[in-house]
Structure formats: C-alpha cells, structure tokens
Amino acid sequence: MKIEIDRKLKTPVYMQLYTAIREMIYSGRLTDGFVLPSERNMAGMLDVHRNTVTRAYAELKDAGLVESRRGRGYVVTFSAPEEKEFRKKSVNWQSLMREEYAVFESDFDYLYNKSFDENIISFGGGVAAREVYPPEEISRVFEEIFRRGSSGAYFHIPYQGDGELRKEIASFMETKGINVRPSQVQVFTENNQAMNFLLSLMLEPGDKVITPEAMSADLYRTIRLAGGEVIPVPMDGEGMICDNLEAIIEKEKPGFIYVDSSFNNPTGCEMSMERRKKILELSYRYRIPVLEEDEGSELYYEEKSLPSIRSMDTEGNVIYMYSFSLTTTPGIGLSFILAPDVIIDRMKNMVSLHTSNPDWISQRVMLEYMRNGVFFSRLDDFRDICRKKRDLMCSCLDKIKDRFGMDYSLPRGGVYLWLKLPGEINARELLRLCQKKGMTFMPGYVFYSEKSRGRNNLRMNYSYPLEDEIRRGMDIFEAALEEITGT
C-alpha cells in the first residue's frame, strides 16, 4: 500500500494517514480482513514517529473501520450490510429539520403574499407605490439593457455588486451626508438577505441583539435562526426609549444594537435626534456595533427626515443598510450595506458560497435609473403619491376611530399606519372577519418576538393599494368593526 505524506500541509500527519487509509477502505482497495502494517513497520515506511501511527490507527478504530486483534494487529472490518428482506420506509422529513425551522412562524409570510392576490384588497405588505414607474417605460429600459448585452460578460455581476452601480450608490450616499468608497458597498437583493448574511458572519450562538420592541418579523426570526437572542427595548413616538439603555447594555452584554431609525416598521415613528446621538454615544463607550436600517428615509411628507446615525459616525461603528424596495417599481429587488472593508471582504466571499450568478438585471435597471437621474426625480412622485394615500387612509379612520375607540399617530413619513384597538377587540379576530369580506392587514403580534404582545395593534400599509382600493378596503374595515362590536 502506497501512502504519501505532505509535511508542508497544516493538516497533522496522523490525520493525513487516517484519511489515506479511510479512502482506500471506502474505495474497496482495502477489503475486509486486510491486515494493516504494524505500527512499527508503518512508522518505518513513512519515516514518522510510531506514536503518529498509533494515533491514526486509533482514529480508524473509533470510526469502526478496523479492529485490533491479538496476534494479528489491526484488521479492516468495514463492509456493506448483507442484503436481506426489508420493509420500505419513508423518510421522516419533519424530524430531520432543525427545530427552529420546524416551528417557523409563517403568519407574516402568508399575509404578505396576499398583497399580490388580485381578489383581495391588501394593506398588509410593505410594497412600493405602483403608479410611479409605468410598465411601458420599464419595458423600454429592459429592452435597452438586453440590447447592450453583446457578450456573455455583460450578464455577469461580481459578487460584491456591479462596480458602476456601487459608484452611483456612493454618490447617492453623499446626498445623505455619508462619505463612503465603492469598495465599502455590498449589494444584495433585499434587506432580509443582507441581514441574514451579516448575522451569520458576526453573530455567535447565544449572542444577544438589542432591538426596538416592535420590529420587522423577518428581523427577529433571522436573529433566532442565527442562534441569537432578541432583547426588545420599549418604544414610544420617538423610537426606542434610551433612558435605561446603558443599564441594559451592562446587564445583557449585547453583540449588536439594531435600529430602524427612519419611520420604523411597523409603527411608522421616527427616532428623535437626541436618541440617535445617545445610541452612537453608547456604541463608542461600549464598543458595540450598531446596525442601522434606513429604507424609509426618502419618504418624508413634512420636513426632511433626520440625519442617519451613520452620517454622524466618526469611528466606523455603524453598519448602514438601505433598500430601494419602497422607492422603485415593485419587483426590482435591490438593497445594500455600507460597512468597513474587512466586513465587505468577508461578505462577498459568503455571497460566492451561495450563488454563482447574482441578480444582474435588477442591478442594471437600478444603474440605468440612477445614471440618467430618473430615480432621483421620481422620489418627489413617490412622496406626493404616498402622502395623498396616507391622508386618504387617515381621513377614513378619523371618521370612525372615536366610534370604535381606536387610536393612531399620524406618521411623518414611511408607508405604515399603526393602530391601537380597544382592549375588547383582538386584531387576530378582526383580521379573520376582514379576510372573509375581501381585505387584509397585518395583526400587531407578528411584530413582537413574544406573541402575547401586540394583540390589540395592527399595521396598515398605504403605499401599494390604489386610492379606490383604500376607500373600498376601509369600508370593509368599518363593516368588520361593526360586526365584531355588535354596533
């Protein structure tokens, strides 16, 4: 038997010997009953210490591939099981799944997908207004992009994202007070994907993440699937309450602070400047990374939204995440993160493990719209349309809120209304009635890591439905309230 040992490898010699013999057994070159050379002889053949061979043989024995027999030494005992009668058995797929996935909470996903059901009026999904980018215009852009594709290389996108697009993103960030190099930008399909990669990279099992108490359902699920623990901090109309945040940090020793700073999903509230500064101060004091999500910042309806935490960061402690999902045509999925070079280098390596062909078409479309200025000019259209829809939905609510004891705060921006129902009305029960009548929304409990919370809250999205759908949907909402309250 010929075995080669490479002493330049970092793999220990005993493991090289174990692996070589195991491969010979698995390939059938060493069959049952074959007697391995004695430890002394093998050590002499390979010019290694006898203890090295002893250790390799012990690994083979532990793996059930050989046995040590008195008077014979180490004998190969691996063999395929003998053929015999058997009963067909189906795989128990449920038992093979990790428990976190087997009990995966999917109410949010079900209701989000209802956004695209033409037979129902949906206030459930956070989807961009569909009136801004006409289909015929998008068709022309697609046609132009494909027309340019004269070579296979044109359809290939680097793992970090299209280089020209990253330059445009860096320029876009300058308008938001953030100076960043294209090399510090990593492009993703959506924020959920970016979050998944980031937490997989930086979160150890058992690590804790501070979050606002009401948050995107995707966020707390991603944290838990990464092995982390959510530490929710109460909110008010100015975002995460920071009065006791330092004490929470001292007690919990979190690995991250997550904030949804501009028009929080689901509450629509905007974090105050004082609290933004406080979070940055605590990040500096305790050397804690901050993950800031900022996708709603362009959809302000009164004065301009506040500066991001990232724009105030002088030490590189804030990872910034942004999505175009609310400010481009529905279906063009694109987001990005801004992070230190060392994080971006690892990110693009992780992307390469999951796909060999990143979504090139969305990146080319976004590049086209940013280069020709259409993206920036259409932001005013998005603001005008969403402001009108917000006001329409609020006017419908104002007519009935006192009658049913509901309450809400007028959002200054974003795409969500967060309603508080009186204690006797359960949002889940109200949702069932609305669905029967042809309308849906998001019940509040899906935005809490503890499902006992938010039972009297609900979230309505006003960006995606058309104005007529908002009117008809609010009529259904009123009828369902009448039925559930008996009024």
Image: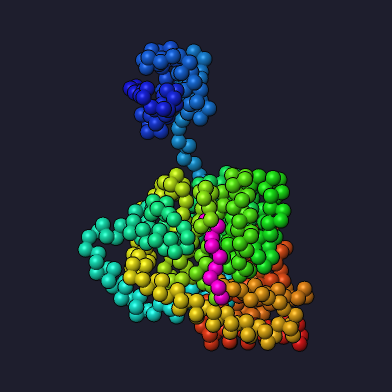
Residue drawn at x 68%, y 87% as measured from the top left:
399
Residue drawn at x 49%, y 41% as measured from the top left:
84
**Residue 359 visible in the shown view:** no
> In the rendered image, which quarter contains the C terminus?
bottom right
Report which quarter residue 292 is drawn in: bottom right
**Predominant secondary structure, magenta span:** loop
Q: Nearer the viewer, residue 19 or 481?
A: 481
**What percent of the width, then of the height, locates residue 142?**
31, 71
> In the rendered image, which quarter contains the N terminus?
top left
Residue drawn at x 53%, y 27% as measured from the top left:
62
Residue 39 belongs to the span the image colors magenta: no
Q: Nearer the viewer, residue 304 or 48?
A: 304
**In this view, 87 is above or below 190:** above
Report which quarter residue 452 is drawn in: bottom right
Q: Nearer the viewer, residue 103 or 23?
A: 103
**What percent of the width, then of the height, locates residue 339?**
47, 51
Whether residue 377 sits left or right of residue 304 in the image: it is left
Q: Nearer the viewer, residue 264 or 481?
A: 264
Residue drawn at x 51%, y 83% as measured from the top left:
466
Q: Which residues are magenta?
A: 302-310
Way the structure is coloured:
rainbow
**What percent of the width, then of the height, locates residue 46?**
37, 17
Whether residue 246 sits left or right of residue 53 in the image: it is right
Residue 307 belongs to the span the image colors magenta: yes
The furthest residue to the left: 150
**In this view, 52 is above or below 299:** above
**Residue 319 visible in the shown view:** yes
The count of marks equals 0
**What percent of the width, then of the height, locates residue 98?**
58, 50
